[in-house]
Image: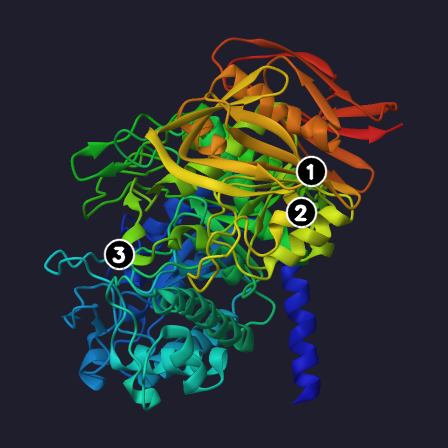
């Protein structure tokens, strides 16, 4: 057993090192015009029709396509597997010199699961069970469902691994407790409250608290046995520790479920790379969501690569700007490369204009696909999968998201995507080796921020991919937006998994909207600043702990000593808006709280317009800390202005942040490092040609190659509107 485990570990490491030496750029194609997760009938009879499609995909420039398997079709009876569609596609891939990535859909579960396990239905918080209608399947917390689920993955892996064309898997598309099913007949649904999930929750609580007595103290309860413990359903005036525990459990259990599926496929196909991808990363999501929200850092620990869907023009009224796109990709890069991991994948990259019922997105052009794809690669993506080859043929997304037309007519955006795939293939080894540069700026991502007030503080729905519309998102986006034009690498770091050692690489750590923090973080931030770091925190830092308990002094967790200040008073500013007057003449707008500070050894750095102290700067150990009595990051997202931009940029100088690459011309410039070489990606997001000049601050003489054309490159060049230039700088 020990030898087998070591062998599996070695093969898994090889797979994680880059998918068997392949950086897949694929397009979703499941055989004919069926939309995922549906399949066309009689696959063997359609083989030659599908061959024509696959040849068209190959001729465009792709070496990989991404098909899918759904549980309902592939296991029509318990233990009898039917992988006939996959078999035909794998045969075609081998015959046409292609590779295959397989998406696994378990939400389309066979009806026999429900007949065999009638107590496996998903149950909402009001006790109402959901009868599946192709989705969302059955609750995996049921032991029988879990066993069948794992057995299916093992059988699929054993079967598909016989083919040389198999490259890898996506084990779970857009993980939630339930997927792609909205029970509109249930008011305010929330999942899952079935007996099996409650049993699993109690086990989680036993592990966390150790005893029923400790749980009773934490929740302010008088339970006499573990069987009495129930998940939170109410909003009460007394405590909401139970609610936070419930949502943290949901995130943990989703991670455990993904890991089980990973281990199941690795047992059958250890050499195939195994991935998964989120619907929308935590930057835009909320742990409050009724479907059951996953945590990106937790999920990324479970597979070779974790990533995201990327739909900049998903549907009507959605056309995301370069900052939004950059924030999503840098957030994904942060968890993809965090904790020593090797990268991330774009599980779904929008390939055509979106549609939801009568809502149609802005047009998706060849320029869009070029910029979107290279933007992902500029952050170090190790796989990009365009969704989809044909538009959706059925459902409320019918007509949307296709790279070509439904009648088979090839579009210019398909040709552009194919050219991108060809370029990546030519430079695959270099791009697999490439890693993002070491960032000196960190923005703290803190899921607990959503829980201030418990269920009272639910977050408003804001977009087709489950995007939140709240101060939590706005604060993270605001900081990123302010730093974005400087082309300075910015990492997002997870508040639940930090140490002083992990923060040591950063000259500047920015803590936006921090009214609830994990208790341990106070000590981590204290040691970071003491060791020479520069910390900026916004209003009411650490007001609440992860148990929802208020601190006696704010900032909490001992941070008042680090900042040399404490809260003297606080109020919601009139209209939720205020302004801070900083030294240097900056008038910085801010949102929500007006927190008046009392210096405790720190010096006043800003005042509100009535003269009250609004910000305090202090020295602590070898470092410095700045406490700001409102939320300027959120305000900068919604109402950016020049004073606020200059103030944010001044923080880079305050902390001594270096700017390795200077890019003149109003362009975006990002880079990756591969040994001594630097791969620079330059984007002109405007419509007019811009004159670009690139300059490395550390000097040096460079040989420059244009990666796309293969010719010589220059550090100064005109870049047409919507243009992309990729240059490889190698030291002479």
In front: mark 3 or mark 1? Answer: 1
Q: Secondary structure at mark 1?
A: strand
Q: Is residue 389 visible?
A: yes
Q: Nearer the viewer, residue 423 or 725?
A: 725
In this rendering, would 125 be left or right of 147?
A: left
| As drawn, 88 above or below 265 | above
Q: Residue 29's x, y, as percent?
A: 38, 49
Marks 3 and 1 sit apart, C-alpha to C-alpha, by 50 Å
The quadrant in which residue 408 appears is: top left
Q: Is residue 343 visible?
A: no
Q: Nearer the viewer, residue 378 or 130?
A: 130
Q: Which mark is residue 626?
A: none
Residue at 40% of width from left, 30% of height from top? 320
Q: Residue 122's x, y, as percent?
A: 23, 71
Quadrant in which the N terminus appears = bottom right
Rate crowding at label 2 as few (under 14), some (14 to 19) or many (20 or more) other CA atoms within 10 Å: many
The quadrant in which residue 362 appears is: top left
Residue on which disc 1 sits: 618
Q: Secondary structure at mark 3?
A: loop
Marks 3 and 2 sit apart, C-alpha to C-alpha, by 46 Å
Q: Tell me if label 2 and label 1 are in contact, CB under 8 Å.
A: yes
Q: Which mark is residue 562?
A: 2
Q: Tell me if label 3 and label 2 are in contact, CB under 8 Å.
A: no
Q: Residue 531's x, y, as percent?
A: 78, 49
Residue on which disc 3 sits: 180
Quadrant in which the C terminus appears = top right
Earlier residue among tags 3 and 2: 3
| As drawn, 92 above or below 368 | below
Earlier residue among tags 3 and 1: 3
Residue at 19% of width from left, 48% of height from top? 395
Q: Residue 599's x, y, as percent?
A: 61, 38
């Amino acid at each position: 057993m020990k030898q087998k485990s070591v062998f599996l570990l070695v093969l898994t490491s090889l797979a994680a090192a880059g998918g068997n030496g392949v950086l897949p750029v694929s397009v979703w194609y499941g055989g004919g015009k069926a939309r995922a997760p549906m399949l066309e009938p009689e696959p063997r009879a359609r083989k030659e029709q599908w061959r024509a499609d696959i040849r068209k995909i190959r001729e465009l420039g792709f070496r990989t396509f991404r098909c899918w398997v759904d549980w309902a079709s592939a296991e029509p009876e318990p233990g009898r597997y039917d992988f006939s569609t996959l078999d035909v596609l794998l045969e075609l891939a081998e015959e046409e010199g292609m590779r295959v990535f397989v998406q696994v859909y378990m939400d389309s579960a066979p009806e026999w699961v429900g007949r065999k396990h009638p107590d496996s239905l998903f149950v909402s918080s009001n006790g109402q069970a959901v009868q599946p209608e192709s989705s969302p399947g059955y609750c995996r917390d049921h032991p029988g469902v879990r066993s069948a689920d794992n057995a299916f993955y093992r059988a699929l892996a054993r079967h598909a691994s016989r083919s040389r064309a198999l490259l890898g898997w996506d084990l779970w598309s857009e993980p939630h407790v339930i997927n792609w099913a909205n029970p509109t007949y249930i008011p305010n649904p929330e999942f899952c409250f079935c007996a099996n999930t409650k049993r699993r929750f109690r086990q989680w609580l036993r592990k966390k608290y150790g005893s029923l007595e400790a749980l009773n103290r934490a929740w302010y309860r008088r339970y006499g046995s573990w069987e009495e413990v129930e998940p939170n359903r109410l909003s009460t005036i007394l405590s909401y520790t139970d609610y936070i525990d419930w949502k943290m459990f949901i995130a943990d259990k989703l991670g455990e479920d993904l890991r089980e599926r990973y281990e199941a496929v690795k047992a059958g196909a250890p050499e195939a790379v195994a991935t998964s991808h989120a619907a929308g990363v935590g930057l835009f999501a909320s742990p409050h969501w009724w479907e059951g929200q996953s945590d990106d850092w937790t999920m990324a620990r479970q597979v070779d690569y974790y990533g995201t869907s990327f739909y900049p023009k998903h549907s009507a009224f959605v056309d995301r700007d370069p900052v939004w796109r950059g924030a999503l990709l840098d957030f994904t890069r942060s968890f993809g490369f965090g904790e020593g991991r090797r990268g991330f994948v774009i599980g779904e990259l929008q390939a055509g204009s979106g549609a939801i019922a009568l809502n149609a997105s802005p047009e998706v052009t060849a320029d869009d696909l070029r910029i979107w794809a290279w933007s992902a690669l500029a952050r170090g993506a190790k796989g990009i999968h365009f969704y989809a080859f044909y538009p959706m043929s059925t459902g409320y997304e019918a007509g949307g998201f296709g790279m070509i037309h439904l009648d088979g007519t090839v579009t210019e955006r398909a040709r552009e995507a194919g050219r991108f795939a060809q370029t990546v293939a030519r430079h695959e080894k270099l791009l697999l080796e490439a890693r993002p540069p070491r960032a000196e700026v960190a923005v703290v991502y803190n899921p607990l921020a959503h829980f201030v007030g418990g269920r009272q503080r639910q977050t408003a729905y804001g977009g087709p991919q489950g995007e939140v519309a709240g101060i939590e998102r706005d604060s993270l986006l605001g900081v990123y937006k302010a730093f974005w034009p400087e082309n300075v690498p910015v990492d997002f770091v997870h508040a639940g998994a930090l140490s002083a050692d992990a923060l040591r690489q950063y000259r500047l750590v920015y803590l936006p909207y921090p009214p609830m923090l994990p208790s341990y973080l106070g000590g981590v931030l204290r040691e970071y600043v003491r060791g020479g770091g520069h910390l900026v925190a916004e209003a009411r830092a650490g007001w609440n702990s992860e148990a929802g308990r208020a601190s006696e002094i704010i900032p909490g967790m001992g941070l008042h000593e680090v900042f040399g200040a404490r809260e003297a008073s606080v109020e919601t500013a009139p209209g939720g808006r205020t302004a801070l007057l900083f030294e240097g003449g900056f008038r910085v707008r801010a949102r929500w709280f007006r927190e008046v500070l009392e210096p405790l050894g720190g010096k006043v750095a800003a005042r509100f317009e009535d003269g009250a102290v609004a910000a305090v700067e202090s020295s602590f150990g070898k470092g410095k800390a700045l406490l700001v009595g409102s939320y300027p990051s959120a305000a900068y997202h919604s109402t950016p202005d020049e004073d606020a931009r200059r103030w944010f940029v001044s923080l880079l100088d305050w902390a001594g942040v270096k700017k390795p690459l200077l890019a003149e011309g109003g362009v975006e410039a990002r880079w990756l490092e591969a040994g001594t070489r630097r791969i620079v990606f330059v984007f002109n997001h405007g419509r007019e040609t811009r004159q670009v000049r690139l300059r490395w601050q550390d000097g040096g003489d460079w040989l420059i190659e244009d990666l796309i054309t293969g010719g010589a490159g220059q550090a100064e060049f005109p870049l047409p509107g919507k243009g992309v230039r990729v240059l490889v700088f190698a030291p002479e």
